[in-house]
Structure formats: C-alpha cells, structure tokens
C-alpha cells in the first residue's frame, strides 16, 4: 500500500511537469501569434487554455483526495501542499499566455507590437520559454541549485521589462497611446509569467530543504 501511495505522489509531480509543457507551448505560440498577427494561432492558444485549467482541477482533486485518505505528515505533506500551490502558479501562467494571445487577436490584422519594439518582445518571449522549461526541470529533478538559478534568470526579464518602459516613456517616442497601452500590458504579462516561474522554483526549494530560498541563495 505504501508503494501505491508513493506512486500517487509521483503522479502528482508528473502532472505538474505536463502542465509546464502545456504552458510552455502556450507562451511560445502566443508570442508567435502576437508578433506575426496570426489570428488562427491566437485563437488556438485561447482555446487550449481549457486543457491547462482541466489538468489543474484534476491535479488538485487528486491532491485533496490524498490528504483525506493518507493524512500525510512531514515531507509527504510538503509535497502535497506545494503541489497545490504550484498548480495554481502554472494555471495562472496559462492565463497569462492566453492574455498575450488575446492582445494579438484584439489588434488583428495589425500587429500589436511596432517594429521598433519587436526585438525586445522576442527576447521576452524567449526568456519566458526558458523559465517555464527550467521550472518543469526543477519540479521533476528537485534540483535546488537549478531552482535558485531561476531567481537569477528572472533578472533578465525584469531588465527587458524596464527597457521597454524606457522606450515607451521617451519624450521622442513615436508610439500612439493605443500602442503604448498594448505593449505595456503585454510586457506586464511576460513579467508576471516569469514571476510565477520564480514562485515555483521557491516552492521546490522549500519542498526539498524546508527552508526559504533567501536563506540559501547567497551560497549559490
């Protein structure tokens, strides 16, 4: 019975990793839809978010069932509690990818991103993809050092977010108010997406060590 119980715990981890795969695909395709003004792709991202939501609901139900049946303690309890929290982070990341896709749909047939800002948005999309891929890796491996590195990787997203704001606030900026609002929102979606990846990394650190990342990061 204990073997079956631990197989159920492992299945929770597998579902979390699958969520990272779905969310990574969503942010990649949403970025392409945004930059290429691809309405069909944007609609597919929006529709596919239902799969992320359904997986989160299934995962949370399984975790709550384990809590009720097994009454776990110590590390097993940490696994289930952090699983519930990480599924929430991933569900929100899926929502943010959907928001990016909706920005693409809203401005179709034009691109919501002007040519002068395209390179920065491309980079933000790439950083977002790397972060969610690393989040999946640390969920699967419980690698504390890699989890702590995600905190540092997020600095690049913050830098791009600030740079974009600088471009938009420049007094010589040629961008319309409508464009500035669109790009500001999109930049915020990417920045928040990265923040959730960091949140997942912190939860993995706590799961493995029982300590908060701020107590460990100075040693990495």
Image (spheres, rainbow, N blue to C red):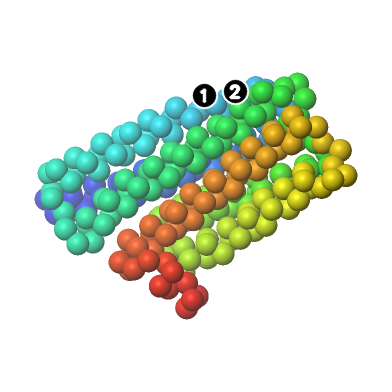
The spot of residue 144 in percent (x, y) is 42, 67
Taking 105 as reference, is 202 left or right?
left
Q: Nearer the viewer, residue 198 or 1?
A: 198
Could you tell me if residue 22 is visible in this image? no
- Residue placed at 42% from the left, 67% from the top? 213
Tell me if mark 1 has few (under 14), some (14-19) or many (20+) residues whose alpha carbon lies within 10 angstroms of its own: few
User: How many other residues sit within 10 Å of disc 2, few (<14), some (14-19) or many (≥20)?
Assistant: some
Element under disc 2: helix
In the rendered image, the vertical position of residue 130 relative to residue 172, given as above or below: below
Distance between the alpha carbons at the discs numbered 2 and 1: 6 Å
Q: Is residue 86 visible?
A: yes
The residue sitting at 80% across, 32% down in the picture is: 176
Q: Quadrant of residue 91?
A: top left
| Residue linked to disc 1 | 47
The x and y percentages for residue 77 are 22, 55
Closer-to-camera residue (52/184): 184
Residues under numbered marks 2 and 1 in contact, where contact means CB atoms less than 8 Å apart = yes
Q: In the depicted view, which residue is nearer to us: 5 or 77?
A: 77
In terms of depth relative to the viewer, which is nearer, 44 or 78? 78
Label placed on residue 18: none
- Per the image, label 1 sits on a secondary structure element best described as helix
Q: How many marks?
A: 2
Spot occupied by residue 149 in the image (x, y as percentages of width and height): 52, 65
Q: Name the residue: 77% across, 46% down.
A: 169
**Residue placed furthest toward the bottom:** 219
Is 79 positioned to the left or the right of 98 in the image?
A: left
Residue topped by disc 2? 43
Question: Would residue 119 appear left or right of 102 to someone viewing this image?
Answer: right
């Amino acid at each position: 019975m204990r073997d079956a119980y631990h197989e159920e715990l492992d299945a929770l981890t597998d579902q979390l990793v699958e969520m990272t795969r779905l969310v990574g695909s969503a942010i990649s395709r949403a970025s392409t839809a945004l930059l290429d003004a691809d309405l069909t792709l944007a609609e597919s991202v929006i529709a596919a978010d239902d799969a992320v939501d359904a997986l989160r609901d299934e995962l949370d139900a399984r975790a709550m069932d384990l809590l009720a049946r097994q009454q776990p303690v110590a590390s097993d309890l940490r696994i289930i509690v952090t699983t519930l929290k990480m599924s929430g982070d991933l569900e929100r990341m899926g929502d943010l990818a959907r928001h990016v896709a909706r920005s693409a749909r809203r401005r179709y047939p034009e691109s919501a991103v002007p040519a002068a800002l395209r390179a920065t948005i491309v980079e933000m999309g790439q950083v977002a993809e790397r972060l969610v891929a690393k989040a999946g890796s640390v969920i699967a491996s419980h690698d504390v050092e890699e989890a702590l590195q995600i905190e540092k990787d997020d600095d690049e997203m913050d830098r791009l977010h600030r740079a974009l704001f600088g471009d938009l606030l420049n007094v010589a900026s040629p961008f319309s108010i409508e464009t500035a609002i669109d790009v500001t929102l999109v930049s915020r979606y990417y920045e928040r997406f990265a923040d959730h990846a960091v949140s997942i990394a912190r939860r993995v650190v706590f799961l493995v060590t029982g300590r908060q990342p701020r107590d460990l990061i100075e040693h990495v």
